[in-house]
Amino acid sequence: MPSLFDGASARIEAALEHIEISEDVAQRLAQPDSALKVSVPLRRDDGRLTVYSGYRVRYDSTLGPAKGGIRFHPDVNADEVSTLAFWMTMKCAVMGLPFGGGKGGVAVDPKELSPAELERLSRTYIDAIADFIGPDSDIPAPDVNTNPRVMGWMADQYRIIRRAHTPAVITGKPIEMGGSAGRTTATGDGAFHALATMMERWERQADGTTVAVQGFGNAGQRFAKLCANAGYTVVAVSDSSGGIHNAEGLDIESLIEAKNDKGSVTEAEGEALSNADLITMEVDVLAPAALESVITADNAEDVSAGVIVEIANGPIASEADATLIDNGVAVLPDILANAGGVTVSYFEWVQNRQAWYWDAETVARRLEDRMVGATRALADRAKDEHVDLRTAAYIMALEKIDRAAAAVGTTEFFRARQG
Ligand code: NAD
């Protein structure tokens, strides 16, 4: 199996069959601008010291400061962080945000830590990367297993280190610390707007359309709730403990309650279902909203859904692309479908820099405008180029970065000058 990063690069190759970009840009995008690996020592509640590995990668800053979340998960590693930072680069470019791409993480299982240990870990990680990040260079945000509280600890630690209030260094903060209205729900909201925009194009109705959501965290829960409210039938959801199914439609509120109060959706009413079966079940719309590579060459042929909304980053391994395209599965690619989060992070950064805060309606309206606009532009481009939506997204992102790079000069420019 190719590394996650090799798989990600394959998508660039596919886009480059349709457009030409400067050789300089292609070369620069083949590796990250800078990658930091740090030790994150944690004094445990019982006095022991445990040292974790932490990472922060700035992949590309052609369009602006690097932007990307921080993940706490035992599987975090250098390849994964680089790949996630690369995807952030493409995502910000597709969305027309003035950011490059970055990502960070600590290889830790936060479920094994007490709240006080989690706070110390969050602060120590920022101590380790403080010289690498900043509101004009690299701006972290939440990702898997990190949330507004963790961002609050991190922003506070940065303030202590710098001896200055610098809220724009981290987004996804609690509202009281300069967070934006609408940030917590933004990823699910954005994915829903992307799906709704495409459904309109396809002249399909929510009524009678079935949906399955893998991963019932921040993004998956919100997406499932919006789908149910809009008239879709959400027939299956899952989390790391497994899934549940009801052909008549699940009650999303009671699933959220089961997840919050008892730790898993499997505690709610419904027939049990494995995560593997959820991916291949008969459903119209499949939304993987957990981790990478859940659809691979091994199970792509068995996917029955006609539409996949990639809420997670990289849920489809690149080796599965051809099978899904051949089988007529429409994939709303991650670099568009989950871009609601970074879009409202951008709004938060703007509000922090101006110290001028927007109400929830303004944030929601601006997010919807951006998501609908980007999805329509992507669908148009895919049609013009006769390519799938993912390839169109990469084409648009690469063009954007290429134009920005050309503005400061490329080999082609300097050669032409020499005559
Ligand atoms: P989260 O930690 O809130 O939720 C993750 C969910 O996935 C949990 O319900 C967990 O139980 C479930 N899960 C974990 N392992 C699983 C497995 N093997 N099978 C099934 N379910 C599993 O995380 P989140 O913020 O909702 O992020 C989910 C995905 O969305 C990630 O890929 C993340 O990178 C992506 N994403 C999140 C945001 C954001 O703003 N939160 C933005 C863009 C992309």
Image (cartoon, rainbow, N blue to C red):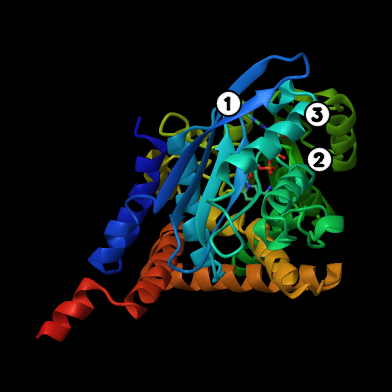
Question: Seen from this angle, which residue lies furthest front?
Answer: 163
Where residue 105 sits, quadrant-wise, is: top right
Image quarter in which the N terminus is found: top left
Q: Which mark is residue 116?
A: 3
- 217 over 73 or under it: above or below: below
Q: Quadrant of ligand 1?
A: top right
Q: In the image shown, does 27 or 251 lie closer to the viewer?
A: 27
Q: Mark 3: few, some, or many residues within 10 Å (few <14, many ≥20)?
A: few
Residue 75 percent coordinates (x, y): 54, 28
Under mark 1, the amino acid is Tyr
* Left or right relative to 140: residue 258: right
Q: Amino acid at mark 3?
A: Ala
Q: Which is more N-terminal, label 1 or label 2? A: 1
In primary-sequence order, the first of circles 2 and 3 is 3
Vertical relation: 29 (above or below) 417: above
Question: Which numbered dot is residue 52?
Answer: 1
Ligand 1 within 8 Å, label 2 CB? no
Q: Secondary structure at mark 3?
A: helix
Report x, y in % for residue 345. 68, 61
Q: Residue at x 73, y 60 (%)?
A: 164
Left or right of 242? Residue 337 is left
Residue at (47, 59) in percent of width and height: 90
**How far is mark 2 from mark 3, CA to CA?**
40 Å
Q: Mark 2 or mark 1: which is in front?
A: 1
Residue contact between numbered discs 2 and 3, judged by CB atoms under 8 Å = no
The C terminus: image quadrant: bottom left
Q: Residue at x 66, y 36 (%)?
A: 124
408 relative position to 175: left or right: left
Q: Report crowding for label 1: few under 14, some 14 to 19, many 20 or more residues within 10 A (C-alpha).
A: some
Q: Position of residue 375 (x, y in %)?
A: 58, 67
How far apart marks 3 and 1 lie (CA) works out to 16 Å
